Amino acid sequence: MRRYLDAGLKGYTRAITSEKLEAVVARCVFAKQQDTAASFNVMLSRIQLACKVTSMLADKDRAYKSTQVIWDACLGHVEDALVYREFNEMCASGRKYARLAAGGSIYVLMVIALRNQRWTIRRGHVNLSTDIGNLLRWPDDSEEGKMITESIIPMVALLARTCPIKIEEIMQDSALLELNGVPAEILCSDLAISDKLFESVRSNSFVLVPRHNAAWAQFDSISKSNGTTDASNDTPSPCDREESPLTVFSEESEPRSIDAQGDCLALAMTIPTESAGVQVQTIATSYDPGHTNNSRFPACRDRNDNNEWTERARAEACGASKPADLQELETTLSTMYVSGKRRTQDSYTRVALDGVKDVLAIQGADEALLASICTSMPEAMKRSLTQRFISCFDSDPLQARTTASDPLTQPYETLHFSWYNRHCTQGHNAPQDVLPRMMRRAGVSRTNHSQLMPYPLKDMVDNAALYESLNSILEDVFAWIDGKVL
């Protein structure tokens, strides 16, 4: 790094003293072009990683059930390898870019790179790329839909015409292409092949809507003028048929998952059951998270009654028992829960931290993780936590006070950075032959399609800058926690 910095400083000094303005500007333009190309290559490499992970998850001969398992088996033991959090983020961003490419072809990623919007997509919540992909495929009468029809589609059509790219140039692993039935020599302007490739990338969302043939006619004519056809099978793809948004997809037209063989990532390895370097002490209880008593809201709904309930519960918690060691704690917890629920609602116990060497995992019924308590945070990280947290805000949000002697007189703001996972649209009575995105609720003027999938809380959307600052500044803390919570 120092070598590159020194070279840059020498070039800077030479530029301001001897080079002409035209030469400096030319170098800036060239650097911008390199930055655009690098951004496009980053998106392609992330898509390739997402494809590889998808193929490994689809491999029935190996026990890869999640990206965490893949990382543990193939990268967790490698010196200087990516930490899992960074590996998972790369896979997630690759799936986002694949969704965009499935909506508007690989040339949409070129436009994103040219407009320097890659970070916007990467940082956006997971549903953003799906929403954009749907709108690209089926532009509506909104201002955004008109912009896609009048500007974006002609732009990507021009790029496809002037910059033809073969599938094999963006997906160099021939095994992936062959097993997915995608001819490597076909151009990316062939929407049938392009859609088939990018739809195969695993995503925790609905399939994209069909492609609007009339809107994409000018782009589709490029592949026909180049003589490319879908030779992989005889079943016409969605963009080769005149389909309405309500057309039922046949089994043949569903995107097939890709597969792969070879490659160092797919080596058969023993999957570790515990992360290296983590000492876990486990206490088992009979608590059942699925018990009806544990699934209801225990406090009062009325605000004033809720405050009184909170104060009573706090007073009861202050009188919690104090086990001398972990063995006594385990005995106390075993008598606290009966038949999956608490024996009484006013019984509390403290956790004896002195006996926790690294991580204490408290489990419920069926080994469900209830709490993970870690006492081994590095001292340097611990000392800097407060100042790093404060730096995420415009001003210091922390106030020192003692609850007993200094009761709270002024309200304080609470932000919840979480997701709605259990309050989405249920759809139990929805028709089975219509894509969710193409449905409308009867008797209302507007249908909120964003609630069809888990979506972020309003606090996260309204305070996006703060949320990103916390993610960035405390990234190493979150990575450390990921390595401790098993």
Image (cartoon, rainbow, N blue to C red):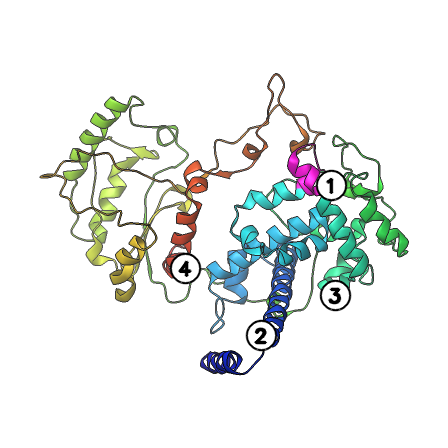
Q: Closer to us: mark 4 or mark 2?
A: 2
Q: Residue at x 90, y 53 (%)?
A: 225
Which residue is under mark 3? 169
Question: Which residues make up the magenta segment?
Answer: 134-150
Q: Residues within 10 Å of mark 1 (few under 14, many from 20)?
A: many
Which residue is under mark 1? 149
362 or 484: nearer the eye? 484
Q: Residues within 10 Å of mark 2 (few under 14, many from 20)?
A: few
Q: Residues within 10 Å of mark 4 (few under 14, many from 20)?
A: some
Which residue is under mark 2? 21
Q: Is residue 140 magenta?
A: yes
Tell me the amino acid under the disc marked 1. Answer: Thr
Residue 316: horizontal and vertical position, in percent? Answer: 17, 34
Which residue is under mark 4? 479
Judged from the image, the secondary structure of the residue bearing numbered disc 1 is helix
Q: Which mark is residue 193?
A: none
Determine which quarter of the picture holds residue 174: bottom right
Q: Residue at x 20, y 52 (%)?
A: 352
